[in-house]
């Protein structure tokens, strides 16, 4: 039967899915090998190439016929790598932003424009040039996101809907300002950098030399994929939210080294105005006022945005966008060192028995998360690794609960929860207790969920809905008796957050 294949790239790994019109699906997943460069987390470009090739070959070897199309999703504003004029990558895909440069380091030629000053100070290349001063000086470099690099290797077209790390919203076309000046501030060249694709549209077709681009000439079967169309379907968060059937009242949450909470709604949900057609002009209409029963998903999304700033990511597809929040959590070296000593041997997952050595409330230790990082309150000599790790998990859940409660009748539906490394699945009960809400625990990896979600979206967009609705299994976890105790700690957490004046 006809199939659609998809590849989902995340900051943690790769997921792939093959979905047939019968509703049956196959999946593949793998994690990136750990890497660091310039003091930042990174993903080696060769590892990305090889895993994409391996995923395609795995799907091909199990298929009875070639796919009708291949969908691609990737991280939005989370990855950045620099390539030379031959499209050879000189850096890994960095997943951390470097420390912002001080104002005094901005050259005078950019000082007259606030936008150029900000672009220079936040530029990933400018930040890593502190440690590697000749990078980008002796030869011109281009800036690409991981999704753009994947499109380049597959089709020869370095285009993606998802932006690289630390670039302005209008990258790579800058309104009212010289494109040359902006790229000069960023330190890269426009002709070597990625292009912007349209979400849900064709990026290109699999190029005949794709195996060579992926460094996979030892996998001859990949040559048979030449000519298959590739569609950019948006961000990996959008795919996960779509697969989870998330909405503004029931969010898709991922707890790992970041806390992510998202849902999908119309692309124009946050537009300042919209045009409507009244087919019955003589009929009387009544304003819904504060009647929440009449609110659509777009209405709820607008209400959330008025309460707290939402991130907006492309996809999945042309008609939807992904809305929500993302907060960095245990990616700092302090938390990493604490977690390293608590891992279950041979895995990147914490030993739950060891984690339970810290009591509910982590001995009074609180980790507060905001858009620019986290603050630790109450740390003392007596606190150990277990306290630090558990406070990070509790802090993420507190942050999620606080945002879910910002609207009086807001996200009161169940949370669709994915627990990623380093958290064991047993932490789901803690999450339900802290959130004081039902939690639908999905055991699939986030990258697989994203690939599955864009598979569904692409099939529907192409007019090929599966005969049977495919689904992912979930386990319902209800809040227990500890929820009342966590509520007291949650009130303290909210008071501390207000006192520290953390921004979203």
Image: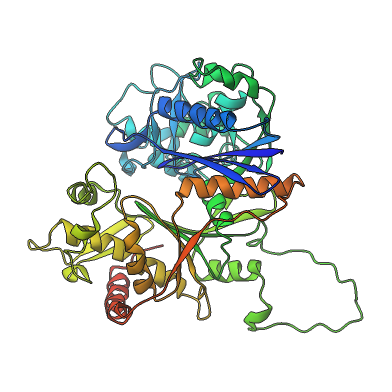
Q: Is residue 35 visible?
A: yes
> Is residue 379 toward the left or the right of residue 81 in the image?
left
Q: Is residue 396 visible?
A: no
Residue 216: x percent and y percent? 49, 19
Above or below for 177 versus 503: above
Above or below for 211 versus 445: above
Q: Residue furthest left?
A: 381
Residue 384: x percent and y percent? 12, 59
Residue 54: x percent and y percent? 49, 28
Above or below for 297 versus 204: below
Q: Quadrant of the C terminus?
A: bottom left
Residue at image point 34% right, 72% down: 434
Looking at the picture, tell me which residue is in the foreground, 213 or 186.
Answer: 213
> Is residue 173 toward the left or the right of residue 188 in the image?
right
Residue 389 figure quarter: bottom left
Residue 86: x percent and y percent? 50, 16
Residue at image point 90% right, 71% down: 279
Above or below for 282 versus 77: below
Residue at image point 57% right, 54% down: 243
Q: Quadrant of the N terminus?
A: top right
């Amino acid at each position: 039967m006809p199939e659609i294949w998809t590849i989902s790239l995340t900051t943690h790994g790769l997921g792939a899915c093959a979905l047939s019109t019968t509703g049956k699906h196959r999946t593949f997943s793998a994690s990136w090998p750990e890497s660091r460069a310039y003091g930042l987390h990174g993903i080696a470009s060769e590892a990305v190439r090889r895993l994409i090739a391996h995923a395609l070959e795995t799907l091909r070897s199990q298929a009875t016929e070639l796919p009708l199309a291949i969908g691609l999703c990737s991280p939005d504003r989370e990855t950045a790598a620099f390539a030379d004029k031959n499209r050879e990558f000189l850096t890994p895909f960095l997943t951390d932003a470097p420390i912002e440069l001080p104002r005094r380091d901005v050259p005078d030629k950019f000082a007259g424009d606030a936008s150029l000053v900000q672009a220079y100070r936040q530029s990933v290349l400018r930040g890593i040039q502190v440690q590697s001063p000749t990078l980008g000086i002796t030869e011109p470099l281009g800036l690409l996101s991981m999704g753009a690099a994947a499109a380049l290797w597959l089709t020869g077209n370095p285009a993606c809907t998802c932006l690289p790390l630390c670039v302005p919203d209008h990258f790579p076309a800058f309104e009212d300002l010289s494109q040359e000046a902006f790229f000069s501030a960023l330190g890269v060249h426009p002709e070597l950098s990625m292009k912007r694709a349209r979400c849900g549209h064709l990026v290109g077709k699999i190029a005949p030399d794709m195996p060579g681009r992926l460094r996979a000439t030892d996998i001859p079967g990949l040559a048979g994929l030449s000519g298959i169309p590739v569609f950019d379907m948006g961000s990996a968060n959008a795919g996960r939210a779509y697969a989870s059937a998330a909405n503004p009242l029931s969010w898709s949450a991922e707890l790992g080294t970041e806390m992510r909470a998202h849902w999908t709604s119309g692309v124009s949900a946050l537009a300042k105005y919209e045009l409507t057609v009244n087919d019955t002009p003589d009929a009387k209409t009544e304003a819904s006022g504060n009647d929440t029963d009449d609110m659509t998903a777009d209405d709820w999304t607008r209400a959330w945005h008025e309460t707290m700033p939402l991130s907006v990511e492309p996809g999945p597809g042309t008609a939807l966008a992904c809305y929500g929040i993302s907060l960095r959590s245990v990616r700092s070296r302090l938390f990493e060192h604490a977690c390293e000593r608590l891992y279950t041997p041979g895995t990147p997952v914490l030993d739950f028995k060891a984690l339970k050595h810290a009591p509910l409330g982590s001995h009074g230790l609180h980790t507060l998360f905001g858009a620019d990082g986290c603050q630790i309150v109450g740390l003392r000599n007596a606190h150990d690794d277990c306290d630090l790790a558990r406070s990070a998990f509790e802090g993420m859940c507190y942050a999620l609960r606080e945002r879910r409660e910002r609207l009086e009748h807001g996200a009161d539906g169940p949370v669709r929860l994915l627990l990623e490394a380093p958290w064991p699945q047993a932490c789901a009960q803690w999450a339900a207790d802290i959130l004081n809400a039902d939690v639908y625990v999905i055991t699939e990896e986030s990258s697989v969920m994203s690939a599955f979600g864009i598979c569904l979206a692409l099939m529907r967009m192409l007019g090929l809905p599966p005969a049977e609705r495919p689904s992912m299994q979930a386990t319902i976890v209800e809040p227990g008796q500890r929820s009342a105790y966590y509520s007291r700690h949650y009130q303290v957490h909210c008071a501390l957050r207000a006192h520290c004046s953390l921004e979203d």
